[in-house]
Amino acid sequence: MSRKRKPLPLLEDVVITDVAAEGNALARVDDMVVFVPFGAPGDHVDIQVEKKKKRYAEGRIARMRVPGDIRVEPRCEHFTVCGGCRWQHLPYDYQLKCKRQQVVDALTRIAKVELPEIAPCLGSDEIWEYRNKMEYTFSNKCWLTYEQLASGVEFPDRDAAGFHIPGAFDKVLDINRCHLQDDLSNRLRLFVKAYCKEHGLPFYDLRAQQGFIRTMMVRIASTGEVMVVIVVGEDRRDELVALLEAVRTEFPQITSLMYCVNTKVNDSLGDQTIELYSGRPFIEEEMEGLRFRVGPKSFYQTNSLQAYKLYKVVRDFAGLTGSELVYDLYTGTGTIANFVSRRAAKVVGIEYVPEAIEDAKVNSERNGITNTVFYAGDMKDVLNDEFIASHGTPDVMIVDPPRAGMHTDVVDTILRAAPGLIVYVSCNPATQARDLALLDTLYRVDAVQPVDMFPHTQHVENVVRLVKIEKAVDEAL
């Protein structure tokens, strides 16, 4: 017979003191640190402990006694349940301070390298409807909130169109309105949901791996162009065509309507064939007169207007004079490569996704840029000593890796190539800090600029300029 678990305590009248990692808030009870989501400094709350270790605990706010002075009213009706915008209850200027502190903490605690003064976080001019890309999941098992479960009401209709609940891969929160993308995105999602229910098209069962309507991606460019990719889990051609035609008719502003039949276990589309139903197979973004083609698999910074600020920081940090050979690692659709090309002699871009590289080449051609070349492949395989010997040792290297940071083989190759300057763009200051520690044998951090790409979330982009030590010494002399 198993022993009964000791019930976890309710901590009463606890004061939230700070903002912690992963978007959580922090409180201290005796000698124990307590992490809780959706708290604001100054809140007096009761915390229901849900996980307890010797020196820390995790819980949720069971009762708000007195809200803190800085707390603001969240705009979204799904706040605290969705899990996407964990900081809607914090003033935006305070969010920016917290994001800068995240960068400070990561670089000092993990990198442990000499640092200059870290600049204030560059804020976003638009803090609502700023995203150019959203991905929605359709499921026949919607997430039920604490309140719904406690009500005792039966919910026979469990179809949902919205977002995955964190930590529950098979549960999807049904979303009425999301404030992160133009409202067209909401209307599209609700239309597809209503159409599928009206026509008896089954929502996907994430556990049984069966059902028709599965996911939908909506991209709305700063140019006003709109891409919609509808993904189904069963190849029911007549029903699919009817759905696509209904969407095309209802939303004539869509410039690229595409579809995919995905019958594999996961939702990733990188290895799937995406077909065009109507319009063009891409949309275009614009920046300083340059037009960038973005396909359904292409990476493009999710906040178009803020991406311009980010790329200007990168260009300024690179300090190009027109004579430099620049390598742009993890180039995506070549946005940074093409953006800085006017001030470089030549730019070499490398990216894992072949479709993105094709877009990068087209972007150069359409903008009359002739000093860029692009290569597709795994970074650790493409960027090697032979590649550098063939294309030349870079004067400046721009790196913008995924959240996992750079592979150690890539770091080793960079150290052997020893460019005079590195501009490191990261969406994860923790892995960036790890890589900075590896580069510290040859480089010193010369400048740090956090940039907020995702208002109301804990995520922050960070740009670091690294100068080769011998070059730094020469300049000082």
Image: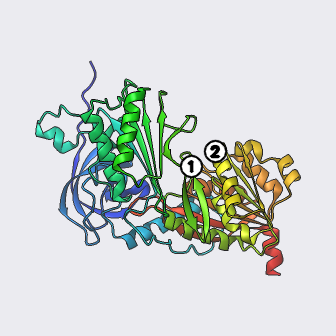
Q: Amino acid at mark 1?
A: Gly
Relative vertical location of residue 182 with respect to residue 195 in this rendering, above or below: below
Q: In the visual, does 126 lie left or right of 290?
A: left
Looking at the rendered structure, which numbered label has been put on residue 209? Answer: none
Measuring from the top left, give residue 25's x and y in whole percent: 35, 58
Q: Nearer the viewer, residue 275 or 335?
A: 275
Q: Amino acid at mark 2?
A: Glu
Comes first in the chain, label 2 or label 1? 1
**Residue 94 occupies quadrant:** bottom left
Which quadrant is the C terminus positioned in? Answer: bottom right
Q: In the visual, does 174 lie left or right of 418?
A: left
Task: Name the secondary structure under disc 2.
Answer: helix
Say which residue appears at 24% left-offset and 66% top-offset: 73
Label 2 crowd bin: few (<14), some (14–19), many (20+), radius 10 Å: some
Label 1 crowd bin: few (<14), some (14–19), many (20+), radius 10 Å: many
Q: Nearer the viewer, residue 400 or 215?
A: 215
Q: Nearer the viewer, residue 363 or 52?
A: 363
Which quadrant is the N terminus positioned in? Answer: top left
Q: Are marks 2 and 1 in contact (CB under 8 Å)?
A: yes
Say which residue appears at 39% left-offset and 52% top-offset: 252
Q: Name the residue beneath numbered marker 2.
A: 355
Gap between marks 2 and 1 measured at Cα = 8 Å
Q: Can residue 381 be seen by looking at this rendering?
A: yes
Q: How is the image coloured?
A: rainbow
Q: Name the residue beneath numbered marker 1.
A: 295
Residue extending farthest bottom? 477
Measuring from the top left, give residue 309's x and y in whole percent: 55, 70
Q: Can residue 32 be seen by looking at this rendering?
A: no
Measuring from the top left, give residue 423's x and y in whole percent: 68, 64
Say which residue appears at 27% left-offset and 62% top-offset: 75
